[in-house]
Every structure is written in C-alpha cells, then in structure tokens.
C-alpha cells in the first residue's frame, strides 16, 4: 500500500486528538441543556397544574394563569424538547468520533455475501473466531471488532448486564413473537415462561399457527431458556480477557452444527480482538463486523444505526452475485443503504458508503458477476457511492482491490469528513439551542409581568420578619422610656426600695429591743466589770454584724429587680415569637432563644441576648459597695478618735446631701456599662467624712450609759446613711436598667443586617407564626412561578453555552 496512506490517516487522527477538549465541552454543554429543558418542562407543568387545580383565584391570579398558558403555548417547550432529543444521538456520536483514536471500517453483508471471508482474509484469523457463513444461524450474535495491533493476539469480552439482556435481547424477541404477556422483567420470570406451548400450538393441532419469523423468535427464546445456566453468571460480570483466540467460538456464534458445550454468546455485547494484520501497513485500523439489519431480538436496526454513527468512519457493504439474484433485488440491502444514508451526519454519501462486489467465482459465474457489476456501477453513479470489487477470499485482491482503494480515499478525505460531520451536528445543535433560548426568553419576559402580582415566600418571610423586628423595637423603646422617666424622677427600682425599707424596719426593731430592752445596761455593766477593754469592741461587732445581715439581704431584691426586667423583655419577645417555645415562661426565659441563635449562627441576636443575661454578674454586691465603708466605722477605736469639731453642722448637712445624691449624679452621666463602679468610687472618696457622721463626737463618757447612748446614736446614723446610700444606688440602678434596655434595643433591633437574622430565626416556624400569609396557596403559586423563572434562566444560560461550544468545535481544525 501507498506509504502516504498511513501518514495522512495519522495526521487526521492527530487533528481529532487536538479537538477532544472542545468536543468534551460541547457534549457536556448539551447534556446540561437537555437536563435544564426537562426540568423546565416539569416546572411549567407544575405551575400550570397549580392554577388549574385551585379554585377561587384572585383577579391578579387569573391574569397570571391566562398569561402563563399563553406563554407556554408560544414557547412550545415540548417541541424544543423533541428537537433536542432528536439531536442527542448525533451529539454523542460526534463526541465519540473525535475522541476515537482509530480509523474504523464497518463491514456488513447478508449471509453468504463473503463478509466473514473478507474479515478472515484481512486479519488472518481462523473460523474459530470468525465462523464461516455455513456455521451461522443466521449471523454473528454480537459485534466483533478487530484491531490491527502488533502485540500478542488476545480478545476482550464485553458482557451485558441482566437488565440489558432482558431489555435488548429477550424483550424484542418476546414482542416480535407476539407473546400474549408483557416481556419478563426478571431472569426467573424468563426461565419460567412457557414459550414451548406457544411454539407447539395451532388451531388444528397439526402445525404452529405463527408465521416463520415468529417461530424463529420462539425457537431462539427456547434456546436461550435451555442454556440459561450456561451464561447466567456472566450477566453483569466485569469484562475479561481471553488470550487464546481459539476459545472465542462459544462467545461469538449461533452454531447450526452440534450444539456447543456452552452457549455463552447470549451474555455477550461485544468482542474486541487485538491481533496483527499481516497484509496491512496502516496502524490504528479497526474492522467492525456489524450484525445484519433485521436480526430479530437484538434491536439490530437501532443498534446498527447507532453503530454507524458512533463507531464507523466508512461502511463496506458486501454482496456476492448468485444465480437468479442481483444486489438490488434484495430489500434488506436497500434498507441497509437507506440506514447508512441516515447515519452520515453531514459526511458525503460517497465518502461514507462503499459498495463491495465479491468476485468469488466459486459462488457465482462470470456472467452473473458482470451483470451485478453493471447494475452496481449505475447505482453507485446515481447515489455517489464508492464502488470496488475483488475476490474476498484472495489475499492479494482483498488487499489491493478492496481494502487498498478504501483506505486510500479515507486517507485523503478523513479530515474533511470529520469537519463536515462536526459542522452538520453543531449547526443542528445551534438551531435547537436557539429554540431553547427563545422559549426561555418568553418565560422570563412573562415573569417580569407576573412578579408584580406575586411576592415570593422569601419576600413575604422577610417582610413579616421585619414587621416583627419593628414591633419588638417599639415595645423595647417603651420599656426603656419608662425606666428613663423613673430615673429622671429620682424613683428607685421598686424591688430595691422595698428591700431597703424592710431592712430598716428590721434594724429599728432590733435596736429598740437591744438598747431600750430590760437588762441591757446591767449586762453591759457586768461585761465591763469583767473585761472593760473588750466589751465595747464586742458590742460594736454585734452592731456591725446585724447591720450587715439585714442590708445584705437587699442583694436578693436586686436580683428580683433584674429578674423583673428580664421577664418584661421576655414578655415582649414572647408576644412576637409565640410559636416553637423559643421564650418559655420560667425563671430562665432566654435559655432556649439563646441556644437557638447560637446553633443557627445568628451572631447578632446571640450577642444581644448574651449581654443582657450577663448584666447581673458584672454589677457586683450592692451592700459591699455602698454600705461597707459606713459599717466599717462602727468600732470602739473610731468612737475614741472621732473629731466632733471637724465639721460644722452645715458641713455635715452638705456631706450627707452629697452622699445621698452621689448615685443619682453618677447614673445621670458617669455610669459605666454595668453601673455601680463609678458610684462606688465616688462614695469611697467620702469615706473619711463618714466617721464624724456615724460618731457625733469623740467618746468621753465611758460609763455604760454614755457608751450605750453613743453606740445607739452611731447605729442610727449608720442605718440612716446606708439607707440613703442604697436608695441612691437604687435610683442609679433605675437609670442603669434604662440604659440596659436601650442597649438591648440597639443590639437586638437596630444592628445592621439584623433583619436577615430575624428571617432565618422565624423561617422554621413561619407557617405557625403567620398562617394567614405563609400557609396560603397563593404563596405556593408564587413559589412555583419563581422556580419556573429560575429554570428558564438556567436553560437560557445552558443554551448559550451550547452555541458557544458548538461554534468552537466547528471552527477548530488542525493548524487553526
């Protein structure tokens, strides 16, 4: 053969390789478009059905329904789907063609046309791999592929799955035999079906009632039933390698001779044989033995067309002249050529199909051969087919007169054939994609009209969540305003005020019982007589402890004040978030909401709640801050050193006034985030001035009566001063709580983007919170239309990518 053939074929295959990436892009884009159009149709059907099944449409909804139906009619989505489906096979085929690393020649021919002889002659393989026509009934059962490979000869067996066997082999045979029941859906059902009864039955009992073709299919089914045990385990098994080609017989043929030991061919999809072709110099050459058209039970007509598109660059159609018959007298031959014409995908018929006249004088006379050649030339000329002839059984003629001219033309034309196929397929694909773009555009344009009347569920959720945020904000502002007004009016927190009054009452009763009760002076005298030094200190300690005991209980009142504020805020939140148990009615009302915001990633709401809950821990012990400096002065030492002349009466009044009002001043402008700390510092600065207020003057009368009077007055002054200080602190706390509510209002309601977190918080319980809106069928209609538009936009994008990928593939050529 001409050395240029291998060179040109190699260049064409290299051109294919360079276009693989573009072919992959095109095929992937087509798949995405197909999926999007299918999804778009489902959404269109669903949206239309929603309007059709719902009664009581509003006037706006009726307008939408009418417009939607009109748009769907104009879009003709099923026509678009049909067009895309019609092009799917060609898109797949062009991808396989470009990804193919071999040049493939398909060989077809009726029984005794010389097809098997030609393949054996070229490949030098015996009848154990390519059986003679006399041994076949009526032809090979599966595709056999023969690749020119210099390595050791071997074969790869590709097997059918169980579903493929039932669907592609048994199902068509069953239907073709006109069996009264549906095809068996399982292997067990197939094994148990009584095909023998149908084969033996007839109206008069003398012969089968079915025609020859039905009888043939029933017999094939019976053979497959009887040998099921031979091949059942192969179905669905992995492909495997056979190194001895002589072992292939039972995998490739329907034998009419003595039954083979195992009928394994039923499980076989393809046989790939790799061996050297001693007569052929062209590498990357593959010959494909195609099953004949019309072979019942293997869906051969469909598979034949698929094979031609996906696996064949050139089709060789062999015929052998016989007495009383010419090539063109056979309806099957004409059908094969018609199918080949449908499979060209833009390639010229003369490049794709070659008529081969087998000049085997052992089977036909010279006159018969001459007659067929004359008619074949006329037919080839009229249809632009390539025509070659030679004796398929003669090695030289098979090489030089049949395969040589075919490879020569293929070498010259393969690159142009690939380009023609790509141009034709991508052109049709662009047209189909254009239809999809037009249909999607009509739906998107309709959406611009529909969305005016149909807010989506997300829109409604955001609106309702924002309304909820606003309602909570208004109530929190009212609550903060009440606390602020109480602070301006100098009104202490009620719970603290009540605690201070209760503590003072208890201390007054205690002091009255102690200092005026019977036996007090006598006990004091007795104690002083025994220990004059420690007795005054001991009784000062008793007084200090009692004051601490009573006033320290006020911290519980402070807890109550903060707890009351928490419950007031919780009531506001509970009114809006009435579902889901987010704000329970107990002593820890924020625990569920705090955990929900934490687990839901609602950072703004979580931080606001955490700051609110943490306030008590940072406020500190009120008595230790304001009462500690006072009660610490009730000692015998302070009584002995007090300077009664250090302050004038006017100074004393001023100090007392400063102490009482200090907390209010701090609350009005100097309080820190949690209050109290600045107030404590201000009061601590006055601690040195407390002594002359607690002890009116230096103790000079050391008699029991004198000490009793001084201690009683110091106790009374301490209780007065601590009460005043704590009341000032209570006023400060009122302002601090007002500040706390204002801070929670800012954090929980006014933080930027917080309304998004409200929507996410409410989404799981939205239908319970707002059943009048979010559980309404109009919302579902809006959502359906929204999804329809989303799928239309996705379809438009996918179709435009198909056009771009198709253009890139069509324009890409070797060297460009």
Image (cartoon, rainbow, N blue to C red):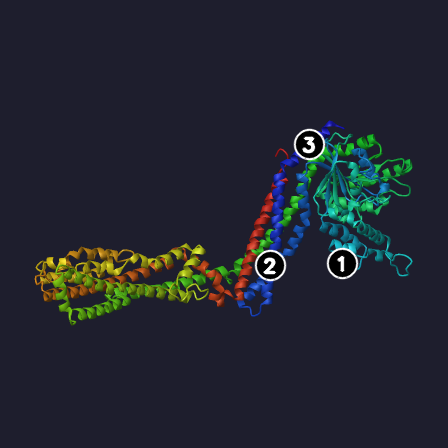
Quadrant containing the N terminus is top right
Res. 755 visible in picture? no
Image quarter for residue 152? top right
Mark 3 or mark 1: whose residue is earlier in sequence:
3
Question: What residue would you read off at disc 1?
Answer: 182
Compare residues 782 and 716 and report the one nearer the observer: 716
Compare residues 707 and 310 and report the one nearer the observer: 707
Q: Position of residue 449 (x, y in %)?
A: 53, 60
Q: Are marks 3 and 1 in contact (CB under 8 Å)?
A: no
Mark carried by residue 44: 2
Quadrant containing the C terminus is top right
Compare residues 332 and 263 and report the one nearer the observer: 263
Image quarter for residue 755? bottom left
In the figure, 85 relative to 152: above or below? below
Question: What residue would you read off at disc 3?
Answer: 10
Sort mark 3 into few (<14), some (14-19) or many (20+) by Cα contacts within 10 Å.
Answer: some
Sort mark 2 into few (<14), some (14-19) or many (20+) by Cα contacts within 10 Å.
Answer: many
Mark 1 or mark 2: whose residue is earlier in sequence:
2
In the figure, 562 relative to 128: above or below? below
């Amino acid at each position: 053969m001409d050395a240029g053939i291998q060179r040109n074929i190699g260049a064409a295959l290299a051109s294919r390789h360079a276009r693989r990436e573009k072919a992959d892009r095109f095929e992937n884009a087509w798949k995405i478009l197909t999926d999007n159009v299918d999804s778009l149709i489902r959404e269109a059907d669903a949206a239309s059905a929603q309007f059709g099944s719902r009664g009581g449409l509003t006037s706006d909804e009726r307008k939408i329904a009418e417009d939607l139906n009109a748009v769907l009619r104009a879009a003709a989505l099923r026509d678009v789907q049909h067009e895309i489906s019609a092009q799917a096979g060609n898109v797949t085929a062009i991808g396989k063609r470009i990804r193919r690393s071999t040049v493939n020649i398909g060989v077809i021919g009726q029984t005794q046309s010389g097809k098997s002889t030609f393949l054996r002659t070229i490949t030098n393989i015996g009848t154990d791999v390519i059986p003679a026509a006399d041994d076949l009934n009526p032809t090979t059962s599966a595709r056999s592929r023969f690749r020119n490979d210099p390595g050791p000869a071997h074969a790869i067996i590709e097997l059918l799955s169980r579903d493929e066997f039932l669907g592609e082999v048994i199902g068509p045979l069953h239907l073709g035999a006109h069996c009264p029941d549906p095809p068996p859906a399982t292997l067990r059902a197939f094994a148990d079906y009584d095909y023998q009864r149908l084969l033996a039955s007839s109206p008069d009992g003398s012969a089968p009632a079915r025609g020859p073709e039905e009888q043939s299919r029933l017999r094939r089914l019976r053979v497959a039933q009887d040998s099921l045990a031979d091949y059942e385990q192969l179905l669905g098994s992995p492909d495997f390698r056979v190194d001895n080609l002589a072992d292939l017989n039972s995998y490739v043929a329907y034998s009419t001779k003595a039954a083979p030991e195992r009928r394994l061919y039923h499980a076989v999809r393809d046989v790939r044989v790799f061996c050297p072709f001693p007569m052929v110099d062209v590498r990357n050459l593959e010959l494909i033995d195609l099953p004949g058209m019309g072979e019942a039970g293997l869906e051969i007509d469909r598979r034949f067309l698929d094979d031609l598109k996906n696996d064949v660059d050139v089709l060789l159609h062999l015929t052998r002249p016989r007495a009383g018959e010419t090539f063109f007298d056979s309806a099957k031959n004409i059908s094969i050529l018609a199918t080949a014409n449908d499979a060209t995908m833009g390639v010229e018929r003369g490049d794709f199909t070659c008529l081969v006249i087998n000049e085997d004088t052992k089977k036909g006379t010279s006159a018969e051969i001459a007659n067929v050649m004359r008619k074949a030339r006329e037919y080839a000329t009229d249809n632009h087919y390539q025509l070659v002839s030679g004796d398929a059984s003669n090695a030289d003629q098979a090489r030089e007169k049949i395969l040589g001219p075919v490879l020569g033309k293929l070498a010259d034309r393969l690159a142009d054939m690939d380009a023609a196929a790509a141009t034709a397929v991508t052109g049709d694909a662009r047209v189909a994609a254009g239809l999809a773009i037009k249909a999607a555009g009509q739906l998107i344009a309709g959406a611009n009209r529909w969305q005016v009347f149909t807010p989506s569920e997300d829109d409604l959720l955001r609106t309702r969540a924002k309304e909820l945020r606003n309602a909570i904000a208004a109530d929190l502002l009212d609550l903060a305003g009440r606390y602020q007004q109480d602070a301006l009016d100098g009104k202490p927190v009620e719970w603290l005020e009540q605690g201070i009054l209760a503590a003072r009452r208890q201390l007054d009763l205690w002091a009255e019982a102690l200092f005026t009760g019977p036996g007090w002076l006598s006990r004091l005298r007795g104690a002083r007589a025994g220990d004059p030094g420690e007795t005054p200190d001991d009784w000062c300690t008793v007084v200090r402890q009692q004051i601490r005991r009573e006033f320290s209980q006020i911290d519980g009142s402070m807890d109550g004040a903060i707890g009351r504020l928490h419950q007031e805020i919780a009531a506001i939140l509970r009114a809006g978030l009435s579902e889901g148990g987010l704000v329970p009615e107990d002593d820890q009302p924020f625990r569920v909401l705090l955990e929900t915001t934490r687990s839901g990633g609602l950072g703004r709401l979580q931080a606001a709640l955490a700051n609110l809950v943490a306030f008590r821990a940072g406020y500190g012990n009120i008595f230790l801050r304001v009462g500690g400096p006072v009660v610490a002065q009730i000692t015998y030492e302070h009584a002995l050193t007090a300077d009664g002349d250090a302050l004038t009466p006017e100074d004393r009044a001023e100090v007392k006034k400063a102490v009482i009002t200090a907390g209010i001043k701090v609350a009005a402008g100097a309080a820190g985030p949690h209050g109290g700390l600045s107030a404590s510092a201000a009061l601590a600065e006055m601690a040195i001035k407390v002594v002359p207020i607690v002890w009116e003057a230096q103790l000079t009368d050391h008699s029991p009566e004198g000490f009793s009077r001084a201690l009683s007055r110091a106790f009374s002054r301490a209780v007065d001063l601590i009460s005043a200080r704590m009341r000032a602190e209570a006023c400060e706390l009122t302002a601090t709580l007002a500040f706390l509510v204002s801070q929670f209002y800012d954090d929980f309601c006014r933080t930027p983007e917080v309304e998004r977190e409200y929507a996410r918080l409410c989404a799981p319980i939205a239908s319970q919170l707002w059943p009048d809106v979010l559980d309404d069928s109009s919302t579902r209609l809006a959502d359906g239309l929204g999804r329809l538009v989303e799928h239309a936009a996705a379809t438009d994008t996918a179709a435009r990518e198909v056009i771009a990928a198709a253009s890139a593939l069509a324009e890409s050529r070797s060297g460009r």
